[in-house]
Image (cartoon, coloured by chain):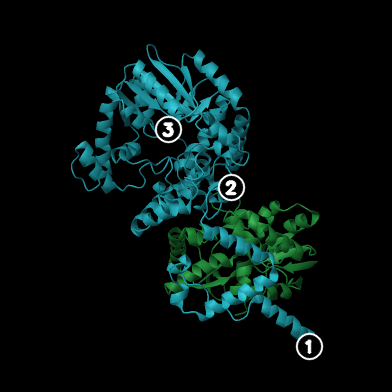
Chain colours: A green, B cyan
Amino acid sequence: MKVGLFIPCYINQLYPQVGKATLELLEKLKVDVAYPSGQTCCGQPMANSGYEYESVGACNNFVDNFKDFDYIVTPSGSCAYHVKKHYNIIPQTDEVTKVRNNVYELCDFILNILKVKDLGASFPFKVGVHKSCHGLRGLRLGSCSEVVGPRFSYIEELLQEVKGVELMPVKRSDECCGFGGTFAVTEEAISVKMGKDKIKDHLESGVEVMTATDTSCLMHLEGLVNRNQQPLKILHIAEILNSSL
Amino acid sequence: MSHPKLASIFNKDEKKVDWHDKALWFVRHKRDKSVHHVQGWEELRNLGHGIKAHMLSNLDIYLREFEANANKNGVEVHWAANAEEHNQIVHKILKDNNAKKVVKSKSMLTEECHLNPHLEADGIEVIDTDLGERIVQLAKEPPSHIVLPAIHKNKHEVDELFQEHLGTKPCDGDPQYLTGEARKHLRQKFIEADAAITGVNFAIAETGGFVVCTNEGNADMGAHLAPVHIACMGVEKIIPKQEHLGVFLRLLARSATGQPVTTYSSHFKKPSDGRKMHIVIVDNGRSEQLSRPDFRASLHCIRCGACMNTCPIYRRSGGHSYDATIPGPIGSILSPGKDLTKHSSLPFASTLCGSCSDVCPVKIDIHAQLYKWRQIITKETPQPFIKKKSMQVMGSIFAKPKQFEKVGKIARWSLRTLPKAVINSKPNAWGKARDLPTGPKESFDDWYKKREENKGKNN
């Protein structure tokens, strides 16, 4: 099984530690993983802003980089969802279909493809999970509160096995954080308000470390936490699952 | 004004935003508690979706069947291609019956058609009899929510409004007193009314009957007291069979307010002796929406308002920020079909979180339609030069890895080196309330390449 690692553009440039944790984690799990160096972005920033046609080059580049892998793994529910859901704008060759079918968010891949739960990690903190929307309602990495059915959460399943983690329940377990790509800028007032409310919910629940499958949500939340100097640490799920504190 | 502008004005009063958000979240939560007790809820949603999809594919057949059956029942059926025709038809019926005083129970369609000002211009008094509707009518405002039209007003504002218009005593916003006074005021209007106008929740093709759902009984009160009943409905309100009500009535009330059933689900079929009943069937852009394959499912909507209650943006921006008859997520996919330029900011008033689609009782893929409208809007309406250009530049950078590397390096250097005051200066809306991350010296890419090189050396 050959796995291609996709590191989203903003993680590559701004949060390399998330990429490193993801790679180390996969290597720890003895995955034959490679990072193709010609990768850039999944194309989502343009597409969600209504400029799908400007993202065609990015989509093609993505497929070129990852067409030879059995699986593509990425520490982002949102990017994985974008490839799966919206790569219908380029011709559906066998390569494109293969890439779309085999792209996985990291937790999903660990739990459902590798079928591993206990990663031997330890992280002695009170952790609050922010269930990023594209992972939750797009990839169905967990049940959401609107839908009637069995309750589950891949990210929580993995965190429960991490030594020392105390999972803190929050009041609004799956409300959006307000990032939303260019929404964060075009609808600045609402975006900021949503983020503030999300942070408040976690702080009031006694959360010390807030985590998610998506660094994009976390960048927005961390931006608020830092500006307002709030006592909340923000980490990507890969950093916790790779931790041995 | 665009949604972001109106929403940022609404957000100037953070306490009010918190209150508005909590009030609607409470309703969403009630909905959850109620639907999680229904075994087969998801199956009901599938059925609701399927029946509506079938109805829309056979709309002409069911509409004609409905008309024929309604006629047999002694009801007069009228057809209106647009809002203007609708208003003229209603006006003519009222004139023919010499009706000067009209009571109306809640109907989003008549809001859409702007019926009230049309009738008032001819000296006809139109009283909205749903309490929330009456409140916004007195305030001379449009409803801000389709089920809870006055949800943007708190009890103290209602207190002041009633003092001014109904002559009530100051009561520190006592809801019981205010409701009591509204009841007295409305009872008088019901008794005096020459005609009653209602909306229609479901029109049944096989019987020619229709159902109106209210919690206050105001539709019944109006329709049973007045000699003339006019029911106005959009073409998409048709359902094929009586038994389908068992699906929709269960879905509607739970999704709207978490109630197992609306307090009054009133079935109307024929006029009582000596009375008259009219049904006005309105298109007003619906068949055009039906012709758009990507957006036709928006016509499944049963107007429960659940997508508004769940939408984190709606809850924090208020219904009036949408500047459309139907606000919130469903409004944001319906309104662009009517006026793309006017409503071009609405499909962007969403993070595409998908909660609206998951809460929708008839499974409209609302967030997917928002995404699709965005693609159309950027092509068919004028866009700010800077947005267009930046997307084009981003698109070309991401298509070429070498360029991406160069630009990334510059961006990281800027974030690391430039003073915060420069980074967060005005053109950067991100920086108004949020810090940007400090640019790391090394990208993941740099780190990985180095690691591979070192591996090579060590081997």
Residue A12 versus residue B129 in the image, above or below: below
Q: Earlier in the sequence, mark 3 or mark 1?
A: 3
Tell me the kind of residue under disc 2.
Ile
Mark 1 falls on what kind of element? helix
Nearer the observer: mark 3 or 2; the answer is 2
Residue at mark 1 shares a chain with residue at mark 2: yes
Residue nearest the viewer, comparing A19 with B304: A19
Task: Tell me the SS state at disc 2.
Answer: helix
Residue A14 in view, yes or no: yes
Query: In the depicted view, which residue is nearer to us: B75 or B284?
Result: B284
x, y percentage for residue B164? Answer: 21, 41
C-alpha distance separating marks 1 and 2: 55 Å
Q: Earlier in the sequence, mark 3 or mark 2?
A: 3
Q: Which residue is mark 2?
A: B376
The residue carrying mark 3 is B113
Residue A77 visible here:
no
Whole-percent x, y for residue B434 in the image: 46, 69
Residue that label 1 marks: B458
Query: Is A19 on the left or on the right of B302, as rendered?
Result: right
Asked if marks 3 and 2 fall on the same chain, the answer is yes
Mark 3–mark 1 Cα distance, whole angstroms, equals 77 Å
Q: Look at the picture and state if B61 lies above or below A55.
A: above
Name the residue rendered at 51%, 52% in the picture: B348
